[in-house]
Image (tube, rainbow, N blue to C red):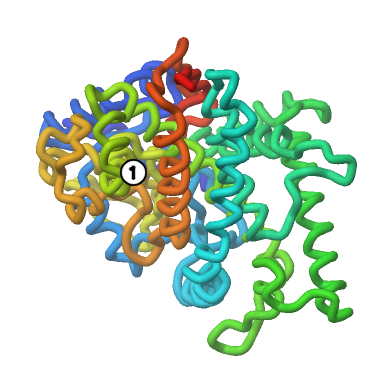
Amino acid sequence: MGDPKTRPVEGWHEVDFNSEPFLTDFKSVYRSMHESGCPYAHSTTGDHYAVGSHAEIMNILRKHDIWKSKYGPALEYLESPGVLVSVDPPEHTFEVRIVANCFSKEVFESLIPDMEAFVNARLDEVFDNREMDLHEAISIPFPLFVIHKLLGIPLEDENGESRIGFIRDGIITSVGMMLEPVASREATMGKLGPDDPGLAGVMKTAQIYQEHLALCKARLESGEWADDENIVCRFLTTPGPDGSFLSEDKILGFMSFLETAGSATTTIMLSNVIYRLLTEDGAYERVSRDPSLIPVAIEETLRLDSPVQGLFRTNDEPVELNGCPLDVDTKVMLLWAGGNLDPEVYDDPHMFNLDRDPAKVRRHLSFGYGTHFCRGAPLARLEGEIFLNAILPRLKNLRLNGEVVMEKRIPVLQGIRNLPVAWDT
């Protein structure tokens, strides 16, 4: 996009959002931003600003006629439209109406028996071992299982080999570069050989999408499959409000988007909520005794440990941000995780509290706000409830069982990489 659009601003924080210090202690950075009275930052490495104020983030998201998604949710400026989080009305309105028909409450609820069976089967496999890496054993495969059930794509190939490994490698590589400046991202990509696991994962997964789309088209045309066989079939047969249909490129984009947004973030949420319950005094026992607390435990974890640090918007006209003039199309990162720790909204925001007002906790920004509110939020919450309702009654005296390793390969996300636990049988 030419010359840099941003610069250091007096009184604003200077933050490297890709750096080890930030990834290790980002909550202290957010605390400092709020305590300074100026919850705004300039990136020291990427050409962008960032906003950590809950109220200002909501204000920006309400002004969707000014603050646009057309250049994508990452630091990179997209050259062609993506889907949902990368488009604006009226295109976004068109896509949302199709998604609403294909991604409905009824569709989600129809998956409940399969979701419950999957989690319990995973627990059966490890129960007698009395230990596991919960992140690897359940938090990663469970959301992928759900998304693949929706898409109608098996998680195993024709030889019975799991696809989870290379799918995850692809997600880590692609999402891991969302905050990387263009020059360094291109340099990184240039160093990746054809055998790089992440690059290979991206390519393999894309090939699976193309093959599945072709299969759905062929079986719909032959009458072997009905229009509700899976979400891809629904995309192919559901018209928008003007009677037109999603293009094949858009459907492929949706498949990739759902794979990433619908699994990686939910994976983080699942491990985060167990980690919170095991590290906050008495929390695991309290929620085990009173399962009615499960929804607030999930929401409070989403607030305190937001899976996504934030996403970007660009301004369609010259504006001021806290008094700082912005050129048109300046990238501004809306820090969901920072807004969720805003003391103007939450008392003792860095404290995990199961007694918070559930309605107020749900004001968190982890699913976004307004026009681009996450359409998969009900599904993520449902997965969280099924996950906890399976684990809490079965794993007695659940406890940490070794070093918990944080995930730092994907700076735009924050979560856990290894979660070793043990229990009594």
Question: Hey, what amino acid is under mark 1?
Answer: Ile
Residue 103 percent location from the top left of the image: 53, 67
Tell me if 53 is positioned left or right of 119 in this view.
left
Q: Which residue is drawn at 67% across and 59% down?
A: 151
151 to 354, vertically: above or below: below
Residue bearing mark 1 = 298
Count of residue discs: 1
Q: Which residue is drawn at 22% across and 22% down?
A: 281
Mark 1 neighbour class, 10 Å CA radius: few under 14, some 14 to 19, many 20 or more: many
Asked if one can make out residue 336 in the rendered structure from this viewpoint, the answer is no
Residue 22 percent location from the top left of the image: 36, 22
Residue 389 lies in what quarter of the image?
top left
147 to 172, vertically: above or below: below
Q: Which of 253 and 273 is in front in this view?
A: 273
Q: Residue at x 59, y 19 (%)?
A: 129
SS of the residue at dot 1? Answer: helix
Residue at far top of view = 402
